Image (cartoon, rainbow, N blue to C red):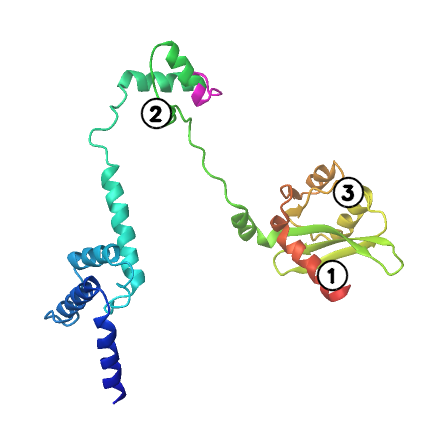
Amino acid sequence: MLGFLLILLRVVIDCSRPREDLALENLVLRHQLEVLLRRKPKPRLRNRDRIFWVWMRWLWPDGWTRQLRIVQPETVIGWHRRGWRLYWTWRSRTRFGRPRLSMEVRELIARISRGNPLWGTERIRGELLKLEIVVSNRSIRRYRWRGPKHERSQSWRTFLRNQMMGIWAADLFVVQTVGFQTLYVFFLIRHERRELIHFNVTASPTAAWIWRQVIAATAWGSQPRHLIHDRDNAYGGDFGTKLAGIGIADVRTPYRAPLANSVAERAVRTFRQECL
């Protein structure tokens, strides 16, 4: 009974609707019925169906979503955007294009850039204009001499993974005491097993004091092949030379790159959270 009343109410409302809306509603419902009645296991939409719904979205903007059942409205909007991109791709096509530079001009660009490796694109373009040769900057960048290709060095992550067995990390961090005194903690940690090798505390870290800690950590014949540390001035200017004298390669991290010494930074975080 309730369903019959709802249908009757809908008929009364439809009688007050404009004739154009009723015609469009009839059209879209007939189209969806035709799609569902196609003799296939699963009705598939064709390109003409997609064009129909894009056109209906433009023709009936207020009511097309209420009668859409076979797809979501967002799908129709995606069809419209894809058609818009295809249209402007077609409008922006070039039938003929810019003529290619002659071989003589290309060789001249390469010869100028090879003989003057510090010249930029604008400088080369200016020199060509003196010879009444008009070339765009893009063409100069394409045909200029690039020089021999250099092999890429291994990344930082690859270096750490390959040399893990022989890498130690060093770091220095600050601790504030209860008596408002500032102390400095220096430590050495092994990359392989995150093993704490040596640590010490001082109120005034100097280059000589830090070097004594390195000697104390390597006094029993156990020393790394590489020692990673930051660029703190407390290490001193000759820290790398001293390390090379005892057979340790000095590896300094880049400026403002704490993640390059992530093992030591993670140890500092552990000290602050668990021990201080």
Outermost residue to the bottom: 1
How far apart marks 3 and 2 lie (CA) works out to 51 Å
Outermost residue to the top: 131
Label 1 amino acid? Arg
- Going 23% across and 56% down the picture, which residue do you hit? 59
Q: Position of residue 165 (x, y in %)?
A: 59, 54
- Front residue of 166/2: it is 2
Residue 198 is covered by the magenta coloring? no
Which of discs 3 and 2 lies nearer the camera? The answer is 2
Which of discs 1 and 2 lies nearer the camera? The answer is 2
According to the picture, the residue beneath numbered tag 2 turns out to be 139
According to the picture, the residue beneath numbered tag 3 turns out to be 234
Q: What is the secondary structure assignment of the residue under circle 1?
A: helix
How far apart marks 1 and 3 lie (CA) works out to 21 Å
Q: Main secondary structure of the magenta part?
A: loop
Q: Crowdedness of circle 3 by 10 Å Cα count: few (<14), some, many (20+)?
A: some
Which of discs 1 and 3 lies nearer the camera? The answer is 1
Magenta stretch, residue numbers: 115-122
Residues under numbered marks 3 and 2 in contact, where contact means CB atoms less than 8 Å apart: no
- Going 46% across and 20% down the picture, which residue do you hit? 117
Quadrant occupied by the N terminus: bottom left
Mark linked to residue 272: 1
Residue 107 is left or right of residue 219, and the answer is: left
- Going 45% across and 33% down the picture, which residue do you hit? 150
Q: Position of residue 247 (x, y in %)?
A: 67, 43
- Going 77% across and 48% down the picture, which residue do you hit? 215
